[in-house]
Amino acid sequence: MQTVKRTTVNLKPEIYRRLKRMAVDRDQPLQEIVNEAIDRHLRTTAGKRTASARFPSLRMGKVKGRLTREDIYRDL
């Protein structure tokens, strides 16, 4: 037997009504409809990564000294 984890999800009233209607139409429990939707979403988005922002490198001149972490955080 598969274990089940309980959680609370706050749904917009319109989404809840649509889910309830779908559950009645399919003669399935609401829990099953929600689990299927989440599973489908996770499978279709698995491995997809958002594009990373690319920043160009800029010339900032010559190095004027060494900067340590202590120097960076000293004034915070």
Image (spheres, rainbow, N blue to C red):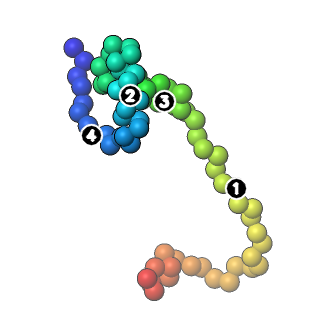
Q: What's the mark number on residue 54?
A: 1
Residue 52 vs residue 17, the one in the foreground: 17
Can you tell which quarter of the image residue 19 is in?
Answer: top left
Please provide percent x and percent y for residue 40: 47, 24
Q: Report x, y in % for residue 43.
A: 49, 26
Q: Secondary structure at mark 3?
A: helix
Above or below: residue 23 compared with residue 42 = above
Which circle marks residue 19 in the picture? Answer: 2
Residue at numbered disc 3: 41
Callouts 3 and 1 close, C-beta under 8 Å: no
Distance, label 3 to label 1, CA atoms, is 28 Å
Task: Please state which of residues 32 and 11 is positioned toward the viewer in this rendering.
Answer: 11
Cα distance in 3D space between marks 4 and 2: 16 Å
The answer to whether one can see residue 33 in this image is no
Q: Which mark lies nearer to you, 3 or 4?
A: 4
At horizontal 48% and vertical 29% (from top left) the residue drawn is: 41
Q: Quadrant of residue 20?
A: top left
